[in-house]
Image (cartoon, helix red, strand yellow):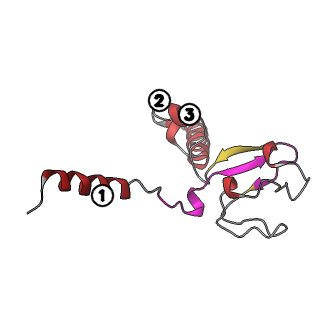
Amino acid sequence: MSTPDAMDQNSEAVGQALEVEPVLEPKEMDRYECSTCGYVYEPIKGDDRRQIAAGVAFEDLPADWKCPVCGAPKKRFQNIGAVGAPSGFKENLKYGLGVNSLTPGQKNILIFGSLALAFLFFLSLYGLQ
């Protein structure tokens, strides 16, 4: 029969085992853009010039890694988010009429689709005569 102290220790051990960080897929990893030349480091591709394998996160790159295009140091890169992620600050995505949570591609479809529809309505005014 288990004592209450033994159960508490077991539940703590199970709780600690569940706190393992989830492994991110390369698609979910953030991309980083060089502020000097515009090169984008994508973890899904890696860096062939510096022998960095695909799937290596930007944070895991060596400290002496430099931009393969212009040679800028790692500190000159800015986080631009994951591929297909909504643009903007993560804390602002819940505001607005749902538009803030759209990806850039979805926003383009919404904007240009609305313009095309407005143009069709404008052309339909000629049919009223």
66 sits left or right of 103 in the view: right
Question: Which quarter of the picture shows residue 123?
Answer: top right
Query: Does the segment drawn in magenta span residue 31?
Result: yes
- Identified at 72% across, 65% down, the residue is 46
Q: Nearer the viewer, mark 1 or mark 3?
A: 1
> Hey, which residue is sitting farthest right in the picture?
70
The amino acid on which the numbered mark 3 sits, given as a three-letter code, is: Leu
Query: Whole-percent x and y of residue 36?
Result: 87, 44
Magenta stretch in the rendered image: 22-40
- Identified at 45% across, 31% down, the residue is 97
Secondary structure at numbered mark 2: loop
- Do the numbered discs 2 and 1 sit on residues whose CB atoms are within 8 Å? no
Depth check: give the residue in front, 105 or 29.
Answer: 29
Secondary structure at numbered mark 1: helix
Q: List the residue tagged with mark 1.
A: 14
The amino acid on which the numbered mark 2 sits, given as a three-letter code, is: Tyr
Question: How busy is the neighbourhood of tag 1: few (under 14 within 10 Å), some, or many (20 plus)?
Answer: few
Q: List the residue tagged with mark 3.
A: 125
- How far is mark 2 from mark 3, CA to CA? 36 Å
- Of labels 1 and 3, earlier in sequence is 1
Q: Nearer the viewer, mark 2 or mark 3?
A: 2
User: Up-down: is 1 above or below 127?
Assistant: below
The amino acid on which the numbered mark 1 sits, given as a three-letter code, is: Val
Query: Which of the numbered marks, if any, corresponds to residue 95?
Result: 2
Query: Whole-percent x and y of residue 35?
Result: 82, 42
